[in-house]
């Protein structure tokens, strides 16, 4: 990452993702509709499964609406500074197992307190140009870390 652009900090200000919301909503609705298929499960088991699906949907959609990362800044050499929704600032380092595609980024980070975080970023969560720059920088970072 010797180019001047890669030495500049990259600011990420994530917002809620409508794509992820719709995907999770559809998956949970399909799971509920599968309970109405003819099976040999007794009614009380179906009720327990339905309650677990509802709880899963509520917790997933709640987590999407209230992001844990408010702001992030990618400094040099894979170092991040995260501002959490609580207002606390945490330093983190990017791990090599991150996934980069045109429609999804999963960042694997290890925080300064030793905790590992996975951060899911979809294209509608950040500005288009920021998402493109993040993809390019991640691919370049992966290429540089593979050599070392």
Image: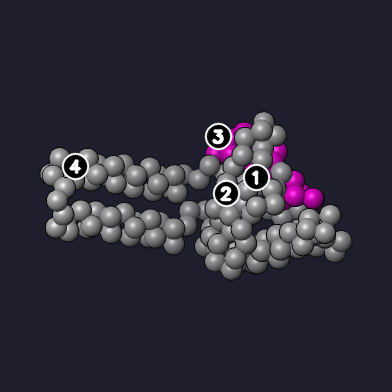
- Residue 109 — which label? 1
Instruction: Name the residue rendered at 70%, 59% in the picture.
Output: 138
Q: Position of residue 13 (x, y in %)?
A: 60, 52
Q: Secondary structure at mark 4?
A: helix
Describe residue 146's horizontal placement relative to residue 69 as left or right. Answer: right
Q: CA distance from mark 3 to mark 2?
A: 17 Å
Which residue is located at x 66 percent, y 33 percent? 114
Q: Which residue is mark 2?
A: 119
Residue 137 visible here: no
Q: Secondary structure at mark 2?
A: strand
Quarter of image, res 29: bottom left
Instruction: Decide if residue 106 is on the left or right side of residue 57.
Output: right
Residue bearing the label numbered 3: 86
Q: Residues within 10 Å of mark 3 (few under 14, many from 20)?
A: few
The extreme top residue here reads 113
Q: Which residue is mark 4?
A: 45
Mark 2 vs 1: CB contact within 8 A: yes
In the figure, 131 relative to 49: above or below? below
Q: Where residue 55 sits in the image (x, y, percent)?
A: 31, 41
Q: Position of residue 57 (x, y in %)?
A: 34, 47
Q: Can you tell which quarter of the image residue 85 is in? A: top right
Q: Secondary structure at mark 3?
A: loop
Q: CA distance from mark 2 to mark 4?
A: 34 Å
**In the displayed structure image, the side of residue 128 where residue 147 appears, left or right:** right
Residue under the point 44% across and 62% down: 19
Tell me which numbered mark, 3 or 1, is placed earlier along the sequence.
Answer: 3
Instruction: For marks 2 and 1, give the CA distance.
Output: 8 Å
Crowd tier of the residue under label 4, counting other residues whose Cα lies within 10 Å: few below 14, some 14–19, many 20 or above? few
Give the foreground label among 1 and 4. Answer: 4
Magenta extent: 73-92
Mark 2 or 1 closer to N-term?
Answer: 1
């Amino acid at each position: 990452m010797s180019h001047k652009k890669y030495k500049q900090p990259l600011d990420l200000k994530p917002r809620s993702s409508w794509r992820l919301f719709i995907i999770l909503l559809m998956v949970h609705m399909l799971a509920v509709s599968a309970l109405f298929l003819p099976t040999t499960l007794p009614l009380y088991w179906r009720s327990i499964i339905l309650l677990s699906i509802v709880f899963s949907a509520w917790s997933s959609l709640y987590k999407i609406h209230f992001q844990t990362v408010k702001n992030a800044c990618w400094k040099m050499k894979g170092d991040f500074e995260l501002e959490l929704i609580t207002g606390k600032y945490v330093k983190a380092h990017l791990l090599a197992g991150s996934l980069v595609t045109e429609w999804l980024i999963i960042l694997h980070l290890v925080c300064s307190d030793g905790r590992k975080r996975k951060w899911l970023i979809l294209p509608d969560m950040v500005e288009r140009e920021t998402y493109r720059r993040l993809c390019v920088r991640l691919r370049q970072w992966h290429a540089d870390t593979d050599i070392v």
